[in-house]
Amino acid sequence: MEYREYGSSGDVLSIVAFAGIVVSSETSEDSERYVSWAIDQGINYFDVAPSYGNAQNMLGPALEPYRKDVFLACKTNKRDAQTAQTDLEESLRLLRTDHFDLYQLHAMSTEEDLEIATGPGGALEVLLRAREAGKVRHLGFSAHSAEVALELMNRFEFDSVLFPVNFTTWYESGFGPQIMEEAERRGIYRLALKGAAHHALSDRRDRVREKCWYAPIEDSELMELAIRWTLSQPVTAVIPPGDPELWKMAVELAQNFKSINSDEEAILKNEARGKKPLFELAHN
């Protein structure tokens, strides 16, 4: 497993993460099996959120034996301080830990999200207090809007941004390069979402995998190209699909990482052509 730098405190993260949604709605036995397999593969970056079904309930006990050796990231999708504080305390309890290595404002998407979370009595105040109290080490956010991501980076010095770095979305809507460029300029670490997604669905009820709201890549050769494309960008790590089978495939493929070349990039551009991107710019 390859590792890349995160932050200035000497942390290094496995280039592929454990996607917490993998253990949502799974048995305790399977959850323990997935976590121990991930540890055996060299994965030390675990990402979870309260909105992933019962993922926190299942991940907490399974991860407990390894907690001191991993980088644990969690999130809140609450925008005001009161409910965000409740989210944080509940996540700490369920995940059986006294701190998170990274805590993030989750799925920042609208102007309203931005104004409430960063305004007086907003969720950002909870993140700051938690860092001061030693309950979180690093602060970040995940973004489903390029415009909101850029403004968030302008308003506060976050440690990292988690956002879609997906070939279809990048080529077909131009979503991603501007976040990457601004984060890199500011020295904010980049964490990638949706590296193994193919395209968006017209109707999410048409999903082929319960834990993927988009059309995932199921072909291993194409998935390898897609993940290598994402990891060839200036990112620390990629969070793979939440479907257990596809997640394991992604982890195995990421272990053979080598930078993508122009011929391979042309294949992905052709795959993306005419497909529905996962996210679009507001002015498109």
Image (spheres, grey):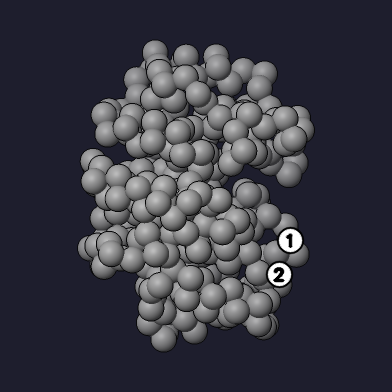
Residue 111, which numbered label?
A: 1
Q: Residue at x 58, y 55 (%)?
A: 52
Q: In which quarter of the image is residue 118?
A: bottom right
Which residue occupies 73% across, 44% down?
Answer: 282
Report the residue marked by disc 2.
115
- The image position of residue 250, as x and y in percent, is 39, 33
Task: Give the Cα distance between marks 1 and 2.
Answer: 6 Å
x then y, percent, for residue 23: 48, 50
> In the image shown, does 147 or 168 lie closer to the viewer?
168
> In the structure shown, which secondary structural element does the residue marked by tag 1 occupy?
helix
Mark 1: amino acid = Glu
- Kindly indicate whether the residue at mark 2 contacts the one at mark 1 (C-beta within 8 angstroms): yes
Percent position of residue 51, x then y: 61, 59
Q: In this view, does 278 lie to the left or right of 74?
A: right
Q: Is mark 2 on a helix, strand or loop?
A: helix
Which kind of residue does numbered mark 2 sit on?
A: Glu
Q: Is residue 251 visible?
A: yes
Q: How many labels does the image show?
A: 2
Q: What is the crowding at mark 1: few (fewer than 14 residues within 10 Å), some, or many (at least 20)? A: few
Q: In which quarter of the image is residue 112?
A: bottom right
Note whether 255 is above or below 138 in the view shown.
Answer: above
**The N terminus, quarter of image:** top left
Q: Quadrant of the C terminus?
A: top right
Q: Where is residue 137 in the image (x, y as percent from the top left)?
A: 37, 73
Res 260 label: none
| Point 55% across, 14% down: residue | 270
Above/below status of 124 relative to 3:
below
Q: How crowded is mark 2: few (under 14 residues within 10 Å), some or many (20 or more)?
A: some
- Please identify the quarter of the rendering in which residue 6 is found: bottom left
Of 76 and 274, the residue lying toward us: 76
194 displayed left or right of 101: right
Q: Is residue 112 left or right of residue 33?
A: right
